[in-house]
Image (tube, rainbow, N blue to C red):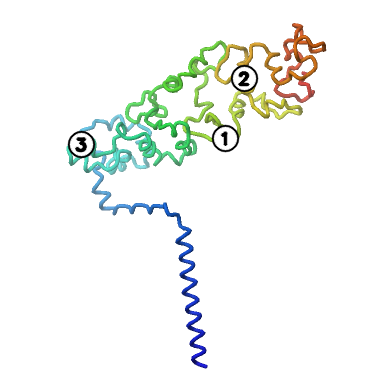
Amino acid sequence: MANSQNGWKLALVGLFFMFVFATTSVITLARPRDKVSPRPALPAKAQAEDYVGGDTCLTCHDIKAAFEKNPHYKSWDDAAKAWSERGCESCHGPGREHVEAGGDVTKIFNFKSATAQKVSDTCLDCHLQQEERSNFLRSEHGINTVSCTECHSVHSARVPARLLKAAQPAMCYSCHGEVKPEFSKPFRHKVNEGLINCVDCHNQHGGFNVRQTREATGTDLVCYTCHADKQGPFVYEHAPIKIEGCTVCHTPHGSQNARLLKRAQVQLLCLECHSNLPGGAPGTPSFHNVSQARYQNCTTCHVNIHGSNVHRFFFE
């Protein structure tokens, strides 16, 4: 009887170890193979020895007076303490080797010689948590290796607000030259005049919408920021506006045509959708015979073309 009980005990123990082994194997197989363990942090003493403090930087670099006016300096909770402990090294990294090598520029992080990816990664160590910049790496600028320092300058910003290297829209035109002529057309958004800026409509740091417009739920919401009377909702909606948006009829930057329309004549724009209606084509006998001048401006009668609360044909 005792031998039988011992046998059951051994069998249970064996099953337990088999279960543990099998579970461990499954967990091991499920673990991502390409996952790299994080590099262990340096001990506090080693970190302290690698950093020489901002006052040491002033031995060669006379920048403190100017840097104290910088938003980066002002953002530190205790600026004086932060400067003495890290200062320039907050962005440029530990400077001990740089100092010991007599100012060897290869011994410290240099934004001018670093890759665009490395520059952006360094800035995003602090700025990634800000909502507007959280998508920078997947933005058109980030994908096309446009680094933060292409537009911003920490030490010699010409525009103190946002530390820009140049004022808008000139800075945007330096890359987007194909857009510049559009703002010189007779009918345009007043960007060159300074009434609005490129970044009022576009999020230069990235977004989820096409062309990085500032609204994630639809390009038209950017337009409605200024043109709120066109938003609705209306009892009778104009379908193309809801389906395709403002740009189905309008060019957003500038146009040779009034109201930034894509066509010089209103009826030609309407006929792109309404050509199948009776009398829609020139010469067709109908009340809407557009060969006659009196019917060539559709919006003479269909006044509320963006939407109406009183009539399904958008009458006033």
* Residue shown at 74% from the left, 19% from the top: 274
Q: Which amino acid does label 1 sit on?
A: Ala
Q: Which comes before the other along the chain, label 1 or label 3?
A: 3
Label 2 sits on residue: 250
User: Residue 238, image x and y in percent?
Assistant: 72, 25
The residue that label 3 is drawn on is 104
Label 1, on which residue?
216
Residue shown at 23% from the left, 48% from the top: 49
Disc 3 from disc 2: Cα separation: 56 Å
In the rendered image, residue 60, in percent from the top left (x then y), is placed at: 20, 33
Residue 143 sits in quarter = top left
C-beta proximity under 8 Å, tags 1 and 3 = no
In the figure, 162 relative to 18: above or below? above
Viewer-proximal residue among 304 and 80: 304
Q: How would you rate the neighbour count of disc 1 (Cα within 10 Å): few for under 14, some for 14-19, many for 20 or more?
A: few
Mark linked to residue 137: none
Judged from this view, the residue extending furthest toward the right is 286
SS for dot 1: loop
The kind of residue on which mark 2 rests is His
Which residue type carries mark 3?
Asp
Horizontal placement of 251 versus 282: left or right?
Answer: left
Cα separation between marks 1 and 3 = 46 Å
Q: How crowded is mark 3: few (under 14 residues within 10 Å), some or many (20 or more)?
A: few
Report the quarter where the C terminus lies: top right
